[in-house]
Image (cartoon, rainbow, N blue to C red):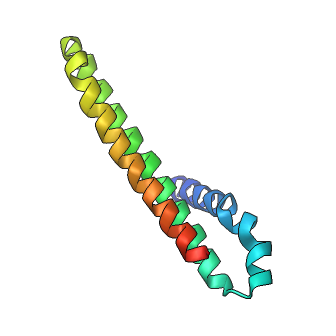
Amino acid sequence: MRKYFNKLVLLLTAIACSPLMALAQEEVKQGKDWAVTLGGAIVMAIAALGGTTAQGRALATCLEFIGRNPDAKDQMFVPMMVGLAMIESLVVLSFVIAIILVL
C-alpha cells in the first residue's frame, strides 16, 4: 500500500511542478481550452518520470556490470553515454510536443 501511495505523491508532485502552473495565466487570456494545457502538462510529467526512471535503471545496470568486470569500464563508457543521451532526447522531444500542444 505504501508503494502505491509513494507513486501517487510523486505523480501529483510532477503534475504540480509542470508547465501548467506557469502557462495558466497566458492560456486564459488567449481563450484556449484548459484541457490542452492540462494535456501538455501531463505529457511532460509522464515523460520526465519515464525518462528519469529509464536513466536510473540504465545507469544502475551499467555500474553493476562494471562492478563485476572492472576492466570493461572503458568499453562501457561510450555506449552508456550514448544510451543516456538517447533517453534524454525522448524527454526533450516530449517537451517540444507539449509546448506545441500548449501554444
The picture quadrant where one finds residue 77 is: top left
Horizontal relation, residue 100 to residue 60: left or right: right
How far from the left and from the top, in percent, is residue 59? 36, 33
The answer to whether one can see residue 61 in this image is no
* 74, above or below 84, in the image: above
Q: Residue furthest top?
A: 71
How far from the left and from the top, in percent, is residue 55? 39, 42
- State the residue in front, 71 or 29: 29
Horizontal relation, residue 14 to residue 24: left or right: left
The answer to whether one can see residue 60 in this image is yes
- State the residue in front, 27 or 68: 27
The picture quadrant where one finds residue 78 is: top left
- State the residue in front, 29 or 77: 29
How far from the left and from the top, in percent, is residue 8? 58, 61
Residue lying at 33% horizontally and 46% vertically, measured from the top left: 86
Residue lying at 57% horizontally and 68% vertically, measured from the top left: 99
Residue lying at 61% horizontally and 75% vertically, measured from the top left: 103
The picture quadrant where one finds residue 28 is: bottom right
* 91, above or below 71, in the image: below
